[in-house]
């Protein structure tokens, strides 16, 4: 192969390599949630969006791509002095997002470092106006103050601070020991209060139970007494009804038999021993008709002497039998009604 042909071949190969390199430099692919800055001859030309794009090779320069997703950065603990001159160590976490790639590239050299320094100075300003107790209990207030200051300051940098969190607020060791002792005392106090409250509630419930038991017992006794009194009342009523019926039956039998004075005298003398059997019967009341009864008795004895058997009832005096039978029947009915 001649020297001229070799030279031409080399030129063709170099041209092909140049074309390939030029094509490679002119075509760029930007991933999703990324953005690129294009500078033409050293000046800002445009911002590359996600997808396929073409730039002018050797004239346009694409800067490193920026991540547009929300990012989390944790800063090392920072010593901060509180209003009561105590040094506390505070860890912070920042959630931020790039929303303007051009401003994030040209407005600040290192926005991460800028956010960190701004966070430290803002923390010192906010915590410096609080005492330790308020600092430990006002996390939300501190977070909102930090977010407000950072959002205003980083807006011109093309950065949006979405959230600021305090990971830890660590007081000095001596203060931590005192706080632990106080917390233990508070826990013991709450436990004692809860125990006393439990005993109190138990006593109240016990007393309430005893009260209800006494009320129910008294109510039961009352109902029992009422029922016993009602039973006694009904028994007395039935007994009185039986006695009234017995008296009425005897009275009717006496009137039906039309007894004479002799029969009445005889029945009266038969009842005298029964009346005398009672222990409390110390005084006898003899009615005014006793003389007439004795006369009737004399006549009956005279008839007995005339030939009647001892203990026999005169045949013509059938009224005595009716009276005695009526009395026995009435007495039986009265006992059955009382039972």
Image (spheres, rainbow, N blue to C red):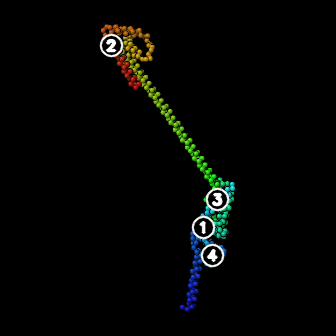
Number of residues whose C-alpha sits closer than 10 Å to that of mark 4, classed few (under 14), some (14–19) or many (20 or more): many
Q: Which residue is mark 3?
A: 89
Marks 1/2 in contact by CB < 8 Å: the verdict is no
**Residue with the mark numbered 1:** 68
Residue drawn 54% across and 40% down?
203
Precedes in sequence: disc 3 or disc 2 = 3
Instruction: Give residue 263's mark.
Output: none
Which residue is at a point 39% across and 18% down the rendered structure image? 250
Alpha carbon of mark 3 to alpha carbon of mark 4: how far? 45 Å
Circle 2 Cα neighbour tier, 10 Å, few/some/many (<14 / 14–19 / ≥20): few
Residue that badge 4 annotates:
61
How crowded is the residue under tag 1: few (<14 C-alpha within 10 Å), some, or many (20+)?
A: some
- CA gap, disc 1 and disc 2: 141 Å
Residue at coordinates 63% horizontally, 78% vertically from top-left? Answer: 59
- In-front residue for pair 289/29: 29
Q: Position of residue 149 (x, y in %)?
A: 67, 61
Q: Nearer the viewer, mark 1 or mark 3?
A: 3
Give the residue at mark 2: 311
State the separation of the CA atoms marked 3 and 2.
132 Å
């Amino acid at each position: 192969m001649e020297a001229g042909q070799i030279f031409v071949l080399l030129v063709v190969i170099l041209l092909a390599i140049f074309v390939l390199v030029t094509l490679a430099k002119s075509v760029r692919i930007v991933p999703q949630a990324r953005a690129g800055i294009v500078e033409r001859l050293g000046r800002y030309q445009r911002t590359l969006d996600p997808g396929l794009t073409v730039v002018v090779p050797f004239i346009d320069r694409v800067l490193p791509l920026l991540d547009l997703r929300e990012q989390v950065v944790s800063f090392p603990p920072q010593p901060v002095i509180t209003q009561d001159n105590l040094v506390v160590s505070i860890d912070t976490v920042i959630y931020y997002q790039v929303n303007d790639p051009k401003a994030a590239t040209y407005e600040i050299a290192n926005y991460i470092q800028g956010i960190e320094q701004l966070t430290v100075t803002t923390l010192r300003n906010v915590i410096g106006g609080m005492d330790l107790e308020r600092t430990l209990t006002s996390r939300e207030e501190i977070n909102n103050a930090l977010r407000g200051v950072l959002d205003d300051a980083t807006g011109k940098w093309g950065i949006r601070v979405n959230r600021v969190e305090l990971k830890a607020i660590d007081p000095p060791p001596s203060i931590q020991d005192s706080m632990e002792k106080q917390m233990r005392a508070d826990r013991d106090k709450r436990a004692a209060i809860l125990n006393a409250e439990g005993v109190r509630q138990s006593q109240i419930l016990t007393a309430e139970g005893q009260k209800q038991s006494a009320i129910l017992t008294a109510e039961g006794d009352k109902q029992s007494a009422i029922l016993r009194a009602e039973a006694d009342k009904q028994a007395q009523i039935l007994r009185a009804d039986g006695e009234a019926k017995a008296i009425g039956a005897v009275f009717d039998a006496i009137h039906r038999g039309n007894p004479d004075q002799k029969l009445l005298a005889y029945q009266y003398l038969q009842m005298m021993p029964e009346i005398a059997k009672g222990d409390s019967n110390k005084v006898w009341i003899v009615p005014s008709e006793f003389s007439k009864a004795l006369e009737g008795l004399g006549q009956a004895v005279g008839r007995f002497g005339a030939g009647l058997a001892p203990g026999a009832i005169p045949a013509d005096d059938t009224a005595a039998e009716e009276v005695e039978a009526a009395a026995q029947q009435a007495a039986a009915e009265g006992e059955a009604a009382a039972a």
